[in-house]
Amino acid sequence: MVDILGMMKKAQAVQAQLQEAQEELARLEVEGQSGGGMVRVTLTGKGEMKGIAIDPSLLVPADKEMVEDLILAAYADAKGKADRAAAERMQSLTAGLPLPPGMKLPF
C-alpha cells in the first residue's frame, strides 16, 4: 500500500530544501579567470555577473579584441564553476527521491 501522507510530507520537505538551495546559490559567488588571471569575472551560483576585474596592462586600444576574448573566456570559466556548484547542490538534495525513470526536476 502506498503511503500517500508520507510521500506528501517528504515532497514538502524536499520543496523547502530546494527553495533553500536556490537561495544559497544566489548567495554563492564563483570567480573565473583567463589570461593567467589578467581578467577575472565573478558570478553568483545562478549565473548573475557580480564583478569584473581587468589588469590595467590590458587596457591598450590595440588589444581591444584580445581583451574582449579574455572577458568571454573568464565568463565561461566562472559560468562552468557556477553550473557545477548548482548541479552538485541539487544532486545532493534529490539523491534520495524515488523519481520515476526519465523524470527530471526543473532546476
Image: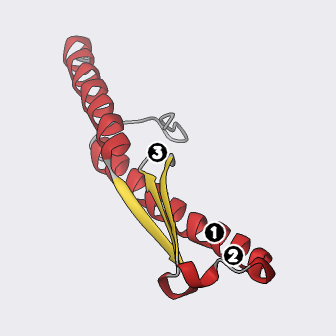
Q: Which residue is mark 1?
A: 71
Q: Which residue is mark 2?
A: 67
What amino acid does circle 3 point to? Lys
What amino acid does circle 2 point to? Val
Q: Which residue is mark 3?
A: 46
Above/below status of 60 relative to 17: below
Label 1 vs 3, first from the N-terminus: 3
Q: Position of residue 92 (x, y in %)?
A: 28, 50
Between disc 3 and disc 2, the foreground one is 2
**Label 2 vs label 1: CA separation?**
6 Å
Q: Nearer the viewer, residue 29 or 85?
A: 29
Label pair 2/1, CB-CB below 8 angstroms? yes
Going by the image, does 3 lie left or right of 52? left
Q: Position of residue 99 (x, y in %)?
A: 41, 36
Residue 42 shows which numbered tag? none
Are there few (<14), some (14-19), or many (20+) residues within 10 Å of tag 1? many
Label 3 vs 2, first from the N-terminus: 3
The chosen color scheme is secondary structure
What amino acid does circle 1 point to? Ile
Q: Secondary structure at mark 1?
A: helix
The residue drawn where x is 77% and y is 77% is: 61
Are there few (<14), some (14-19), or many (20+) residues within 10 Å of tag 3? some
